Amino acid sequence: MLSCQADKPEVVSSICAVLAETDVINMVSRGITAPNILKGIHLSMAARLSKLLKSIGATTGVVMMTGGLALDKGLVAALEEDIANIKDMKSIVRSHSESIYAGAIGAALWGAYRFEKLAARQIAKAA
Amino acid sequence: MTIAAGIDVGTGAVKAAIFKVENGEETWLSRSLIRIRQRDPIELARVAFDNMLEDARLAEREIDYVASTGEGESMPFHTGHFYSMTTHARGAIFLDREARAALDVGALHGRAISIDERGKVLSYKMTSQCASGSGQFL
């Protein structure tokens, strides 16, 4: 992974994606290497994500990454790094090769659940 | 036996899955992933659904429930819609029984959801304002 080869990550703005993108363009013209730019983006996103996790009280136990960026090994590594640096956070970050499907899986399983519930109710009504 | 399809219409891609549930046992029959470039996402949802039907050798009438999530609420062929908070929570539990939180990072935003052992949502928090779009250019 490109981001894992970074030796001196360059931090990007974590306030706004548009600012971050401008930062990246500036870095490219300043001759900063791709791994360092990428790692910088990953670290700034990781900082935001670990803050989110902390705010919902997920400071221990397994955290499952879902969605498309769960496949981004650099981001997952940056998140692990960031969590390790936070004093009272011991969450274990996991990712899965099928993580991007999490929403679709959940929808199908909830759909099946609702269907079975409705079917059971209809049988009860008929009886 | 119940066969259900789940279609997750996102900002970057359409994700779809078909599951068979029999006596509490969940079997993943088919999946489809299409990136959204220029075409209408709802049209792509239909393509993804058709791809899965063909792949699993199923007819549309054999699907008991077509569930949409994400931006898929306006899909004309769905049976019902689920909020993406609940579907991601359930999906995370399916992928890893031990998961007690789901961290959904997609093209649109990052979102942390804390869940119980059955996949029920306990609380959640989303990235706010314009920081959300970072997944878009990564």
Image (cartoon, coloured by chain):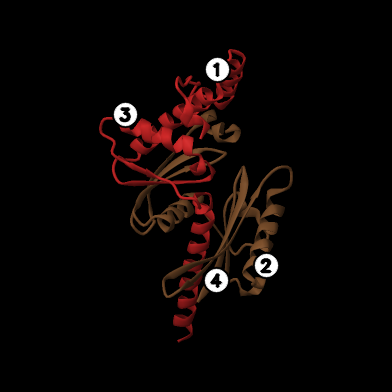
Chain colours: A red, B brown
The numbered mark, 3 or 1, whose residue comes first in the sequence reads 1
Residue B54: give its label: 2
Q: How far apart are marks 4 and 2 (CA)?
A: 15 Å
Q: Which of marks 4 and 2 is nearer the N terminus?
A: 4
The residue that disc 4 covers is B3
Q: Distance between the residues labelled 2 and 3?
A: 48 Å
| Residue at mark 3 to residue at mark 4: CA–CA distance | 45 Å
Same-subunit check for callouts 3 and 1: yes
Q: Which chain carries label 2?
A: B
> Can I make out residue A19 in this image?
yes
**Residue bearing the label numbered 1:** A32
Q: Mark 4 lies on which chain?
A: B
Amino acid residing under circle 3: Asn
Q: Mark 3 lies on which chain?
A: A
Task: Say yes or no: labels 2 and 3 on the same chain.
Answer: no
Measured in 3D between alpha carbons, the distance from the residue under mark 4 to the one under mark 1, in whole angstroms, is 52 Å
Q: Which of marks 1 and 2 is in front?
A: 1
Q: Check if mark 4's residue and mark 2's residue have beta carbons within 8 Å.
A: no
Q: Name the residue under label 3.
A: A85
Q: Do the residues labelled 3 and 1 touch (CB within 8 Å)?
A: no
Mark 4: amino acid: Ile
Foreground tag (3 vs 1): 1
**Left or right relative to B58: residue B89:** left
Q: Quick check: do tags 3 and 4 share a chain?
A: no
Count the marks: 4
Residue B77 seen from this side: no
Q: In this rendering, do the residues under marks 4 and 1 share a single chain? A: no
